[in-house]
Amino acid sequence: MSVADSLRESVLAELRKRIDPSTFSTWCTHLQFVPSGADRVQVPLPNEIYRQWVERQFRGPLEEAFRAASGHPIALDFTAGAAPGDSAPWPAIQAPAADEPLPPPVEAPPVPRVPRPRLNDNYTFENFVVGPTNRLAHASALAMSESLVKNYNNPLFIHGGHGLGKSHLLQAICHALWQRYPDADICYLSCEGFVNEYISAVQNRGLESFRNRFRNADVLLIDDIHFLSEKEGSQEEFFHTFNALHDANRQIILSSDSPAKDIPKLSERLMSRFAMGLEARIDPPTYEMRVAILRRKAELRGRAIPDSVLDFIANHVTTNIRDLEGAVNRITFYATLTHREIDVPLAQESLKDSFGYRAAPITIPEIQQAVCEFFKIKISELMSNRRSRAFSIPRQIAIFLSREMTDQSLADIGAVFGNKDHTTVIYSVQKIKDLIPKDDRIKSAVDGIRTVLQRRFSR
Ligand code: ADP
Ligand code: MG
């Protein structure tokens, strides 16, 4: 795939989410994008009539699609009379008479009675990278996708921060179930969708069909259930939906940005229902997962990214997977616009305004300082050879974070920590790595210090 093709593909993928399918296939597959300088793209159309019409219909969604695909705003110039290399004829629009209004927007096709929700084709199990921080959520989701028969873990409640793969997993379950059971009534929607449909059912006296729709589902998946917070009416309705499905042995799968007990203003009884099944938490990805995810995203975009650049992104974008994707999009987009190879300097340039990445990397003394503040010990104690746990654990954490957050070699790190040799550095890094999954206090110390450092040194 050429560079221009990969750019076009990702913009069209974003545009597809914003336009109804028939309009998309009639019009948007003809669009060409010609980079014309940094952050500018030309959209050539066959003549002035098309130019006006396409611009009027699609400027808004296209600008959003470019922004989503590249992570930053791109100026669009719609031009007439110069569509290079587009051999397929454009669909006809009637030339309007001088005082006649332009043709109306293309109507959306009639909505089927029980619409299958639009899912993201990429949100599949094959495209989901598994690692220590999402293994349980992944394994549980996979188990749910294997049969329609209710699992003992009902509901499955997946929770975790923004951009960590909750929607991806829920949609992967839908894709897999549809493949196995094409006729199954699998009901997937966002909690916001549930609330909106409930409100309009109440307004239009449509409660009965609303209830039938949900209570007859074979599987109900609701994304972002924390949206029920403070919405008493919707909570009440969902409580009955939940009970009806649960009593009928139908599987319920929910996602949330926090554990059920931390959703503010959620009724006690819903909270206890949500805790009845299996709770699976997703944590931010480890370095190794970040690299694997970046590699997969680059492959999906048909774009090879050198290992040094993957390492650079994985070291600087540590928050969540959506940000990792944003970084890949931004870098590939920037390379396309500037006609340059993807390398570390280009990655530095294209990420410098985003993701809290700062051009000057964090230094080891800054890490030492943050660790001492966290554990309330002195720098001299951190640097000493004292073996008591009160000093050795902070020292090992500082060494671990120095390895993770800076580009220094093992020998350099050893030198800064009071002339320790590189085997001590390796030992410390390994020890903390081993302790993180086993010891919650170590894990939260490492996470806490890392967050402090990222905040302190971003922007
Ligand atoms: P959430 O719903 O938790 O906010 P999403 O499911 O929307 O997050 O994920 C954000 C982006 O990150 C999506 O594009 C998704 O495909 C990607 N993503 C999340 N987790 C993974 C993973 N483990 N492997 C590959 N891609 C992932
Ligand atoms: Mg989501």
Image (cartoon, grey):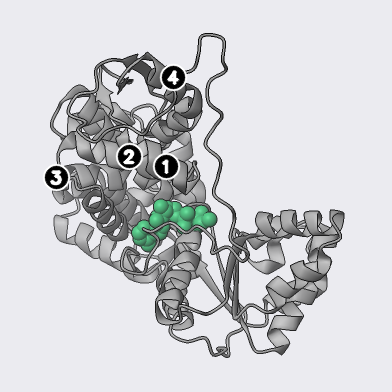
Distance of mark 3 from mark 4, alpha carbons?
50 Å
**Residue 115 or residue 305, whichever sits in front:** 115
Whether pointer 2 and pointer 1 mark residues with C-beta atoms closer than 8 Å, the reply is yes
Q: Who's the residue at 86% across and 54% down the image?
A: 203
Q: Is residue 206 left or right of residue 79?
A: right
**Residue 443 or residue 379, whichever sits in front:** 443
Q: Amino acid at mark 1?
A: Phe
Residue highlighted by disc 2: 29
Query: Where does residue 140 sit, x and y in percent of width and height?
Result: 47, 79
Q: Is residue 391 left or right of residue 111?
A: left
Q: Who's the residue at 59% across and 58% down the image?
A: 257
Classify 10 Å Cα crowding around label 4: few (below 14), some (14-19), many (20 and above). few
Tell me which label, 4 or 2, sits earlier in the chain.
2
Which label lies toward us, 3 or 2?
A: 2
Residue highlighted by disc 3: 306
Which label lies toward us, 1 or 3?
A: 1
Whether pointer 1 and pointer 3 mark residues with C-beta atoms closer than 8 Å, the reply is no
Q: Amino acid at mark 2?
A: Thr
